[in-house]
Amino acid sequence: MPTRTPARPSAVVTLTAVLGLGLGLGLAGCSSSDGKPELKVDGAFMPQPVNDAMASGFLTVHNSGGEADRLTSVTSAISDEVTIHASENQRMREVRGFDVPADGELDLERGGNHIMFTQLKQQLKQGEKVTVELRFEKSGPLTVELPVKEPTYNPQS
Ligand code: CU
């Protein structure tokens, strides 16, 4: 009979490798942040709004720290009405916050959860930038620039 490598030990080896990699990156990324959320934002953008009534914003918040945090609000000079929305089954509703898990990330992406701007104070065009301030339960606020992209822009597709 031919010998086959049992599935179990190889799965264990893979998992160990992944855990080892994650730990290595964590140590390299932040040395003095044990137990605290360590937040970083990337992939931010706003699809060019159709009109000045409504716009949405997307980004990813990475947490390389050992404690979870929570996005609680967003503000911007372009609108007095900035809210955070969850999307389920093509419908959206305002939520009080989004968790940013320890050693994890919060993804706001097209078709899903997003930042919602209503009653824009100016018409936004592709190539411009919108500055927002993200506020969190534990970490200090983060200022993020959202480049305005074409209306159909989607980094996932
Ligand atoms: Cu919305």
Image (tube, rainbow, N blue to C red):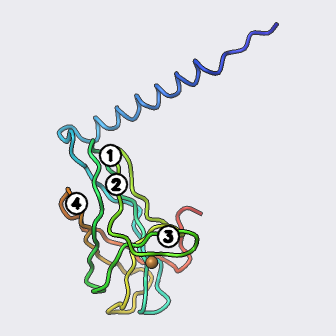
Residue 9 x/y as whole percent: 58, 18
Q: Amino acid at mark 3?
A: Ser
Viewer-proximal residue among 39 and 8:
8
Viewer-proximal residue among 88 and 118:
88
Earlier along the polypeptide chain: callout 4 or callout 2? Answer: 2
- Give me the C-alpha separation between circle 4 and circle 3: 22 Å
Q: Amino acid at mark 2?
A: Val
Direction from residue 37 to residue 20 in the image, left or right:
right
Q: Which residue is mark 3?
A: 87
Circles 4 and 2: CB atoms closer than 8 Å: no
Secondary structure, mark 2, is strand
Circles 4 and 3: CB atoms closer than 8 Å: no
Q: Amino acid at mark 4?
A: Glu
Q: Which residue is mark 4?
A: 137
- Give me the C-alpha separation between circle 4 and circle 1: 13 Å
Q: Which residue is mark 2?
A: 100
Secondary structure, mark 3, is strand
- Above or below residue 146? Residue 104 is above
Earlier along the polypeptide chain: callout 4 or callout 1? Answer: 1
- Give me the C-alpha separation between circle 2 and circle 3: 17 Å
Secondary structure, mark 4, is loop
Q: Quadrant of the N terminus?
A: top right
Give the image quarter of residue 94.
bottom left
Judge the density around disc 2: few (<14), some (14-19), many (≥20) Cα neighbours within 10 Å.
many
